[in-house]
Image (cartoon, grey):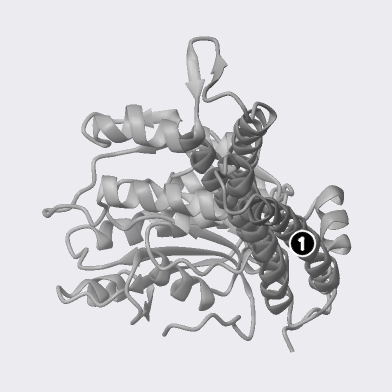
């Protein structure tokens, strides 16, 4: 099973979903504890539930153990942690979805207060291991003191979310909230995608303390700290056009314009001095490169913004909406033409002066670089406008992506 689909009925309150790949030593205990959690919810709140084991191709009999303990096994053929969870959740019948690992690192009974938070109105409830307990040997020091704190801090900075433990594997989410996220990740970055898109969609997110225990496996874990840590980092950046594209673009453009402006303002000076630092013609090439990269990066960021709004995982602010409403193919073409024409005329004037001097000495290197920089940037703007129209559904006005009835056709 690889496709997302909603079940015909959601006749249960809670579905506890755990991914499984050769977890025969622990899956039975995990199902037992999950059943205890469901019993507590039944006794205290009258809630009904189920345990789903999303098996990712186990060859050690994990499926039979899970069934014998009363779990429903869903076979997920697409490989990966995220693929397994998505497959299991697509078959879940509960209004509230709980996810947790099947290696005894989490106690599913601690999901009971999570469900209570959802029942009280929250849309996503995260476990927080740092606010709870991390037992000795449960988390490598590099994850505990470097990886998780750094990535969680970046999440709070980039997405302005108060989540203190963004990578906790035990969490609960309302079905309607889950379906609104449109999650697609197949690997470990699924955990980040859920949190990031929840923040982008302004879902109500809360945390409860949980305990992380050493897993009960008799083999190494599937998690690779460095590989999966970088995948989480890259995923965060991909969902943040401001920090991935616009911020670097602004820095590069400012640097390039300032350096090139200083050099052009002092055409007769072999070196332009800033304190004890000298800027010569070579720095004009550096500045030109920075401006060109800045223009390309800005256009890429605008495309990422359009795609995010189009795919509904970005909730645009009023400022972003104004930008998109003002963005049209004709506007981009006109801006590109003006910038290109400015550079072309500038270069033509320089060339004409050289011709009128009888091909004499030409001391216009800085101006020539600036003129051709404008021509390159103008071309980028014009072609960028076409690409924006393509990703906007082949529309001349890019505001089409803001429509709730938007389709690419």
Residue under label 1: 341
- Find residue 206 and report its horizontal and vertical position in percent: 63, 40
Q: Residues within 10 Å of mark 1 (few under 14, many from 20)?
A: some
Residue 27, image x, y percentages: 26, 62
Q: Residue at x 33, y 52 (%)?
A: 228
Disc 1 secondary structure class:
helix
> Can residue 40 be spotted in the picture?
no
Can residue 87 be seen in the rendering of this structure? Answer: yes
Q: Nearer the viewer, residue 394 or 151?
A: 394
The image quarter containing residue 19 is bottom left
Give left or right: position of 114 versus 375.
left
The quarter of the picture where residue 151 lies is top left
Tell me the quadrant of the picture where the C terminus can be found: bottom right
| Towards the viewer: 139 or 380 | 380
Q: In the image, 170: left or right of 340?
A: left
Identify whether 388 is placed above or below 374: below
Q: Residue furthest top?
A: 275
| Residue lying furthest bottom | 409
Residue shown at 57%/53% (left/top)? 359
Q: Residue at x 63, y 41 (%)?
A: 253
Q: Quadrant of residue 168?
A: top left
Q: Residue at the location (19% across, 65% down)?
A: 24
Between 324 and 141, the residue placed more toward the observer is 324
Report the residue that reaches farthest toward the front. 358
Which is nearer the eye, 84 or 313?
Answer: 313
Whole-percent x and y of residue 103? 27, 54
In-image side of 160 versus 126 (left or right)? right
The image position of residue 273, as x and y in percent, is: 55, 16
Judge from the rendering whether residue 216 lies leftward or rightward of residue 125; answer left or right.
left
Q: Where is the N terminus found, in terms of image quarters?
A: bottom left
Q: How many marks?
A: 1
């Amino acid at each position: 099973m690889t496709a997302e689909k909603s079940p015909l009925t959601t006749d249960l309150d809670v579905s506890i979903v755990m991914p499984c790949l050769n977890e025969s030593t622990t899956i039975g205990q995990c199902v037992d504890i999950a059943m205890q959690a469901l019993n507590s919810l039944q006794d205290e709140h009258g809630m009904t539930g189920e345990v789903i084991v999303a098996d990712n191709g186990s060859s050690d009999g994990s499926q039979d153990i899970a069934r014998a303990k009363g779990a429903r096994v869903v076979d997920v053929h697409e490989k990966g942690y995220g693929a397994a969870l998505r497959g299991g959740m697509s078959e879940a019948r509960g209004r509230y979805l709980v996810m947790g690992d099947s290696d005894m690192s989490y106690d599913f009974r601690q999901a009971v207060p999570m469900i209570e938070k959802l029942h009280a109105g929250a849309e996503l409830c995260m476990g927080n291991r740092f606010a709870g307990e991390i037992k000795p040997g449960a988390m490598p020091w590099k994850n505990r003191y470097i990886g998780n704190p750094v990535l969680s801090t970046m999440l709070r900075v980039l997405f302005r979310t108060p989540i203190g433990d963004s990578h906790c594997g035990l969490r609960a989410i309302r079905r309607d909230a889950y379906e609104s996220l449109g999650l697609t990740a197949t690997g470990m970055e699924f955990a980040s995608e859920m949190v990031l898109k929840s923040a982008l969609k302004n879902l109500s997110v809360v945390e409860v303390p949980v305990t992380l225990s050493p897993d009960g496996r008799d083999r190494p874990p599937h998690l690779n700290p460095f590989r999966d840590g970088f995948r989480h980092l890259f995923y965060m950046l991909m969902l943040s056009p401001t920090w991935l594209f616009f911020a670097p673009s602004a820095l590069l453009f400012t640097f390039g314009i300032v350096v090139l402006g200083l050099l052009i303002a002092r055409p007769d000076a072999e070196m332009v001095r800033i304190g004890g630092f000298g800027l010569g013609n070579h720095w004009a090439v550096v500045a030109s490169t920075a401006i060109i990269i800045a223009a390309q990066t800005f256009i890429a960021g605008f495309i990422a913004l359009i795609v995010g709004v189009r795919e509904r995982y970005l909730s645009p602010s009023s400022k972003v909406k104004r930008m998109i409403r003002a963005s049209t193919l004709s506007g981009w073409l006109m801006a590109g033409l003006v910038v290109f024409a400015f550079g072309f005329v500038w270069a033509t004037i320089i060339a004409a002066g050289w011709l009128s001097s009888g091909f004499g000495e030409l001391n216009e290197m800085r101006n020539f670089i600036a003129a051709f920089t404008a021509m390159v940037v103008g071309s980028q703007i014009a072609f960028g406008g076409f690409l924006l129209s393509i990703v906007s559904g082949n529309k001349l006005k890019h505001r089409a992506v803001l429509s709730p009835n938007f389709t690419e056709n």
